[in-house]
Image (cartoon, coloured by chain):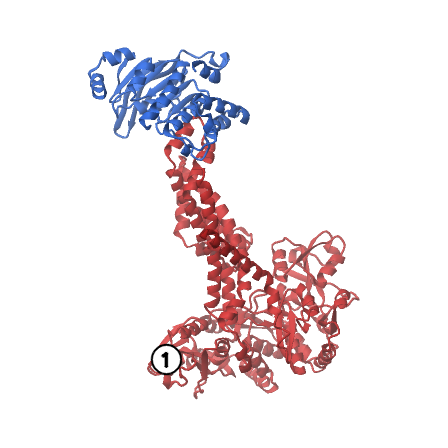
Chain colours: A red, B blue
Amino acid sequence: MFRKKWLMAILFIATLVISLIVGNLKTEYVTAQDNADKKLVMVTSADYPPYQFRQTDSGNSEIVGFDIDIAKYITKKLGYKLEIRDTDFSGIIPALQSGRADFAMSGMTPTAERKKNVAFSDLYYEAKNTIVSQKTSNLKNTADLAGKKVGVELGTTQEKTAKSLKDVQVVALNRPGSIIQELKSKRLDAAILEDTVAKGYVANNPELTYEPIPTTSEEVGSAIAFPKNSPLVNSFNQVLQEMKQNGELQKLITKWFGSDGAKVSSYQANNNAANAATPSNTPIAQNTQNTGRKLIMVTSADYPPYEFRKTGSGNDIIGFDVDIAKYITRELGYELEIKDTDFSGIIPALQSGRANFAMAGMTPTPERLKNVDFSDIYYEAKNTIVSKKGSNLTTIASLAGKKVGVQLGSTQEKFAKEKIKGAKIVALNKTGDLIQEIKSNRISAAIIEDAIAKGFIANNPDLEFTTIPNSSEEAGSAIAFPKGSPLVQPFNKVLQQMKQNGEMDALVKKWFENQGGNQAAEEQKKPSSFETAWGSIPFIAQGIIVTLQFTLISSFFGFLWGIVLALFKISTIKPLNIFAKVYTSVFRGTPLLLQIALVYYATPQLTGYDIPALLAGVITFTLNSGAYISETIRGGILAVDKGQREAALSLGVPYQPMMKDIILPQAVKNILPSLVNESIALLKDSSLVSTIGVVDVLRRAQIVGAEKYIYFEPLLVAGLIYYVLVMLLTWGGSKLERRLQRSA
Amino acid sequence: MNDDYNGVLKKDAAALNGKTDIAIQVEDLYKSFGSLNVLQGISTEIDRGQVVALIGPSGSGKSTFLRCMNLLETPTSGKVFIDGKEITSPKTDIMKVRQNVGMVFQHFNLFPHMTVIKNIMYAPLKVKNISEEEARRVGMDLLKKVGLEAKANAYPSQLSGGQKQRVAIARSLAMKPDIMLFDEPTSALDPEMVKEVLDVMKDLAKSGMTMAVVTHEMGFAKEVADRILFLDQGKLAEDSPPEQFFSNPKCDRAKQFLDNIL
């Protein structure tokens, strides 16, 4: 009886988890309309850079992009607060129709069908479609696509365009990223993507190229969508008009589309010409004079919000410093190339002349000044003391005798060591670690730069920060140049100009003040971190499919491979014997993590086959678990009474059927508990695939942690999910065992 | 019952054609396990239809000798012929020979994960490629002969020791062998179950099966065997008809042995 109740409980939990996955999108919207005093809810599909996309890996998972900037501008002008909701592209129109959102911006083209269901603003951007393909494939125009496999994003105007072409096999995928991947692995011959999107990908995938498709008479451009008869349409159009006139729109176009990557082809000139109707700033005109002149900047792209990589799409380096660098180089008429290196490699890069300048949130210290030149300070960071609320650690003096955390190698470390008397300094690798240590009382306070501290405080209501008044010493960021570089003066001039025309303030605001929405008023409404973690269950639970996929496929093949190896081991054929023994010792003797990395990274280099992460994971787990299972099976075979073998032999039964029908069934029955053990271990080990970029349960928990500034709560959720999965596996295993036991 | 076995196991004349009168011939057989010399030069032959009991003190090499006859043990030197064919030659397909030489073990060695009838049907199906119905028919007939047709669908774990051994005999017979080797078939049985197994063996002997039986059942040896082979320290110490062996053994070692057990 008890056992039955237990079973029901597990089934209940499983059902709950599944229904949460299914209900994911719906639950996100529920409250949207309710608290909309002066708030507008916008839906978008944040997977379409540069229109809208997420920056995830930096402890900052905001949706950013061209559309987002426009939406922010308009709502601010109209006096609304903006709330952005992410959904699948196909869920946008339903969200508008059901009133769960006030408007939608998602690079949407106002097609006739869509106009039946929603209202559209004027066009804010006209995009062109392009054919993206491998450089070698020579696909130039739509006629070339006859008989080819062509990828498009599901539900887009490109899908429609592709379907209208003759003899083209259209493959609709969910994400542009997967289309590019399919192109690279030659599963697709070409793809039709919007030019701006294509440009970003091509810049980052040198083997690809794109060709614009001449515009048809039909409207292709992006407009804002509203529910039918929305009163917002007119006011939005007014602001759009205003943006076109005051140059704001052009600025954003340049920001998001203008200097993306390094490829600037004649096509971009067309693009600019198309937009010439709108008043334009001078930079582009200047730019053309200097085509071909290029400045190389080095940075260490691991320091958000100064510079960091956005994952998920083009893997571009973005950030405050990058924006400044782009602005300055554009003003001066240079192309910009950004190189990533370790922080410690920056000064050597400048000294060796491999880079023209460096921006990495660098403070011009006397030591550094010996080796490189610096521009004026472009941003002064302030240090803050972060501590638990009520701890009263607000001055440097109060830190005496306390444990104080800093980030390893930062100016804060130096600052703390020099200025805080009598404190014990603890240097950790990541700011997130510092926060967690404060929360768990292992350190009393941490010295963190204000911009970064702000984001964390906003999301951890139990903490507070106090800004440390600046000392006389220079503590701010400047641009570094090789000694005697002629660029220092022009750069300083542009920096001056940026400070005067408000551009710098805009960037400071963009990168430092919008982190995590830290307005005091909003802070009040913040859910507790557990509620946040609870809300993230559906997101984390989506990793179950990946995790189970790995476990089941790898267990199955690992088992088969284990049998083969076990037979090799008990075989009398020497080479097989030796092979199996060496194999096992290698795979048991090296870390699984290393094996995954090797399979994933070495395969393309050695064989030219770009192995997908999922396949690499499955292969590694199969190979590894085969080694372990083979020992278990060998033990199981040896444990089968030798009389069984003799009986079979005396009946004249040959080796193969004897093994298959007599020995292995008995061996497997005996080792079943060990096999269940092995697959449980595999299920948990599958979390290692997150290291090669597979988004499984653990990886998702980490993403949530980074995005929501919470540390262990999502891990608890992931732990719970793993535990439930293991329970299910255990239950299945013991059921199987009982069933086999019946026949003996 | 005598005729019944003939009915089940009957071979057509062609199959027996050309076979010699000597079923098993052993020439100067040696077998060592490391430094332990278990068999030290045994030569003998067993005629077709003969029942031979192998008797001797423990460690004398009886079981090893028996197991050399179907190469479950590989002799260190010497030759073994079955039906005139040298099975110790590497050219011989030993699997083929074993199909014709059944063996019954002390510990039955039934396949625990198969039902009784599946145990019996398995080898004929796998090795002889006969049809499922044919295998089942032969299997059920044999079960009837050993008095266990009611247990056809039971698993070995549900049987008593005597029943298991009778099933094991039926399993060997299902391959229709010419020769049957018995390796202490009743040693692992409770005393009250010994008889049911010996009865089956007696019937089999009467049907004309060539049998070599390692046994401690002197009554059975006296009543059923045509010859007694007495082994001592890896050597064939005496080879006599049972009447003579039990009443007046030739060698002293045999005398001593009989004194100890009788």
The answer to whether A736 appears left or right of B225 in the picture is right
Q: Quadrant of residue A50?
A: bottom right
- The subunit letter for the residue under badge 1 reads A
Give residue B243's position: percent from left, percent from top: 28, 11
Residue beneath label 1, please? Answer: A417
Q: Residue A524: percent from the left, percent from the top?
A: 53, 79
Q: How many marks do you count on the picture?
A: 1
At 72% from the left edge and 67% from the top edge, which residue is drawn?
A128
Q: Compared with residue A117, is residue A399 higher up or lower down, i.e. above or below?
A: below
- Quick one: label 1, few (<14), some, or many (20+) residues within 10 Å? some
Residue A494 lies in quadrant: bottom right
Percent from the top left, x then y, of residue A63? 59, 71
Quadrant (top left/top right/bottom left/bottom right) for the C terminus of chain B? top left
Most distant residue in the right direction? A217
Residue A258 visible somewhere in the drawing = no
Q: Residue A368: give x, y in percent of width and height.
A: 44, 78
Residue B221: quarter of image: top left
Vertical order, A575 against B70 (above or below): below
Viewer-proximal residue among A542 and A333: A542
Which residue lies most toward the front here? A1
**Visible in this render: residue A636?**
yes
A685 lies left or right of A178: left
**Residue B148 drawn above or below residue A340:** above
| Quadrant of the frame with the N terminus of chain B | top left
Q: Foreground residue, A432 or A231?
A: A231
The secondary structure type at the circle numbered 1 is: helix
Viewer-closest of B9 and A105? B9
Q: Residue furthest bottom?
A: A472
Would residue A126 be found to the left or right of residue A466 on screen? right
Foreground pick, B99 / A178: B99
- Disc 1 marks a residue whose amino acid type is Lys
Kindly identify the residue that appears in the image at 38 percent across and 38 percent down: A638
